[in-house]
Image (spheres, helix red, strand yellow):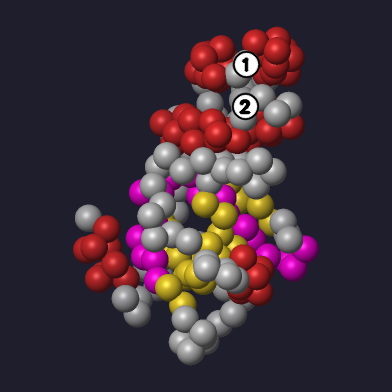
Amino acid sequence: MLKVARILTEGVKLAGTLTLWHGGNLDEYNESVNHKTGRWEFGPGLYLTTHWETARKYSKGSRKLYRITIQSGNDAASTQIAYEEAVKFVKETVGRAKQKEVLERLSKYSSRLSADTFINIIINNDAIKSSNSGVLRSFLVQNGVDYSIQDNAFGWNERMVVLFNMGKIIKKEVIRGSDPIDTYDLPKEFAEDPNA
């Protein structure tokens, strides 16, 4: 399925897509990748940005610069998580020392819990170890959360997308130093359907 999508998108700006930069190593990314301590302050996912210079800094050394196109999906800010599912996740994943505090904070949102709020509670309370960040990402995807959008995360008026659902990637290309780049700072909005 992914190969077909790549062929279809070459040279075409598809409606409902967003192209972003990533500096890192995606040769072997998969659903079970975990984060190092202090490296997932906006959530457990693949960090993408519209700002070329930010991605270029992260691509130094043995890493690479990528241009990645993702399909529109469900943002954490506008996606609700069932309170019962959140409580179940906390009881199964969060250590006993933190469980009570996290459950108390979650109880304030028992009638309406956005995925964004849930992620913030987990991260701000250091509720899970970085080695379990992949478990949190899987939980988010299972509950219909594809990514989290953060504006001006690095201070360059950019848009950052923390991608949880790797199935939303429809094109991944390595950009080498000799490759021409037409646009360094990419559009922040998903492409609209020209026929709409």
Residue 99 shown left or right of residue 21 in the figure? right
Label 1 sits on residue = 95
Q: What residue lies at 29% left-to-right and 67% top-to-bottom?
A: 6
Assess whether mark 1 and mark 2 are in contact (beta carbons under 8 angstroms).
yes
Q: Is residue 69 above or below residue 80?
A: below
As shown in the figure, which amino acid type bears the numbered disc 2?
Ile
Element at label 2: loop
Query: x, y percentage for residue 144?
Result: 44, 35
As shown in the figure, which amino acid type bears the numbered disc 1?
Gly
Disc number placed over residue 32 in the picture, else none? none
Asked if residue 23 is among those painted magenta in the image, a careful observer would answer no
Label 2 sits on residue = 128
Query: x, y percentage for residue 76?
Result: 57, 40
Query: x, y percentage for residue 26?
Result: 43, 59
Q: What residue lies at 66% left-to-right and 52% top-to-bottom?
A: 150
The quadrant holding residue 123 is top right
Magenta part of the protein: which range?
155-173
